[in-house]
Image (spheres, grey):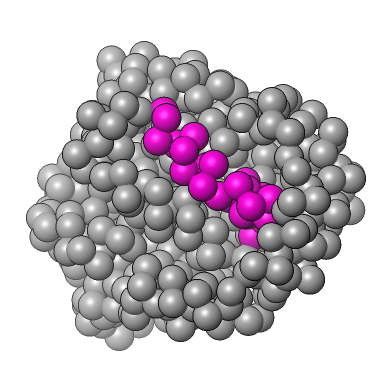
Amino acid sequence: MNQQNKDLMTYALADYTCSCGHRHNTNIRQINLDGDLGAVIDRLIRRQNGKADRVLSSDRNRLLLVADDHTWSACGKKLAAELTALSYSFETCIFPGDPVLIPDEKAVFSVINHLRPDIGLLVAIGSGTLNDLTRFVSSRTGLPYYIVATAPSMDGYASTVAPLIVNNMKVTLDACGASAILADPAVLAHSPDIMLAAGLGDILGKYSALCDWQISALIENEYYCEPVASLVLDLVEKCRGQAGAVKRRDPQAARMIMEGLILSGIAMSYIGNSRPASGSEHHLSHFWEMAYQRQGRTPVPHGSKVGLAVIITCALYRRLLSAKPDFAAARARLNQLNRESWLADMHRVYQDGADELIELDAHSSKNDPVQIAGRIDRLEREWPNILSIIEKIIPEPDIIRQALAEVGGATRPSDLGMDQDLVSDGLRYAREIRNRYTVLQLYADLGMTETAVEIACSLWKITDLP
């Protein structure tokens, strides 16, 4: 096995009690980024079939390959020929390449509808959406699945959750991890420019995610693991330096980005949720994605939105280093909070998804004035520690912008077809999507949400916005 695969497998197969007091492990059993995909799948099946928990059996001896037209051309057709030569039987579920596939109820049913009684293994060929759909179906049917990655574009390859669109709302559902994560660096390196840039954008998003997580540990007493956070921060720094080589389509650079994305997913498995890799920047991305969905617009890659969002969240954090929060004024404004006005905003902004967010708020009580007052007290007490965390983790937004520009990624709202209202509304309302403490909630608690909007808009000239 390649040494790089061994290093990843050391993390994937680890099962230990960390200094944080929690047990860390994953359910990933194989990672192979060396190519020769048909032979690798054959080897994995034969090895696993020598054990009690067989992948295939006499009555479940077929595979279901899930792809779209693009990923089928990039990798699926060759893999299918290799599997045929190895005497494997399979069904195919191939979605159209255009328009962009939406991971909604219709897409889930399409995969399920291709299942036959003799299917024993699902193989997703693609990246984000195809992986999430296959993972979800795997979790609900009990069938194992492998993911054959075609682009280093997002960090969900090693995840155990499935972000889907349900009732026009972005929801994250419990699912299962892939039994094997496979890729060919040559295929990764020649994935579309936008997918390469998206992968780097998703990794750079960890800057604000990690800062959000550590500050939440101070303010909300959330569980936090310093060794896992340090592992993720280290991989972000290493991957940031690969932007130029990725742009040149260097297979080793593409492989390094892929390794970083997988390791990010392993970190999430260690913690049991997405905290080490997803925070305010992902909430903004999800908000924009749902807005695109409601407007009937063509989606853009998740990592592209995350990369743009982390420019904003880093700017918000860096501004706090010179800010002089008025904690007394923040407490005083709590008397002006209007529940009816908030409910009206939820229905106006989220439309048919509003009820779910209102229920989430009722469960968490995060907008309750008493809860906010307690957070303000803790913010005031912990402010020096918060500034120290920001200084340690958060780079200047121009550093993010330069890395994304080097790989050809989106660095302005106009690059993704966003206008000023969509950017601003994200800063006002994206925090409602999850019950997690982030820099967006921090600004809201201090009565500085409109300041956040001004900071974001100042990053780009008005003429940069369509």
Position of 208 compared to 87: left or right? right
**Magenta stretch: dominant SS?**
helix
The reply to whether residue 281 is in sight is: no
Q: Is residue 2 magenta?
A: no
Identify which residue, 264 or 390, lies in the foreground: 390
Q: Quadrant of residue 457?
A: top left
Q: Measuring 58% from the left and 78% from the top, which residue is drawn there?
A: 339
Position of 193 compared to 432: left or right? left
The x and y percentages for residue 394 are 63, 28
Taking 174 as reference, is 413 above or below it?
above
In this figure, what is the number of numbered marks? 0
Q: Measuring 39% from the left and 62% from the top, which residue is drawn there?
A: 132
Taking 361 as reference, is 309 above or below it?
above
Position of 183 compared to 359: left or right? left
Q: Is residue 437 magenta?
A: yes
The x and y percentages for residue 456 are 45, 36
The reply to whether residue 209 is in sight is: yes
Q: Measuring 54% from the left and 42% from the top, which residue is drawn there?
A: 451
The x and y percentages for residue 54 are 50, 69
The x and y percentages for residue 352 are 34, 80
Q: Measuring 78% from the left and 37% from the top, which residue is drawn there?
A: 386
Position of 34 compared to 339: left or right? left
Q: Which residues are magenta?
A: 436-459
Identify which residue, 221 or 464, lies in the foreground: 464
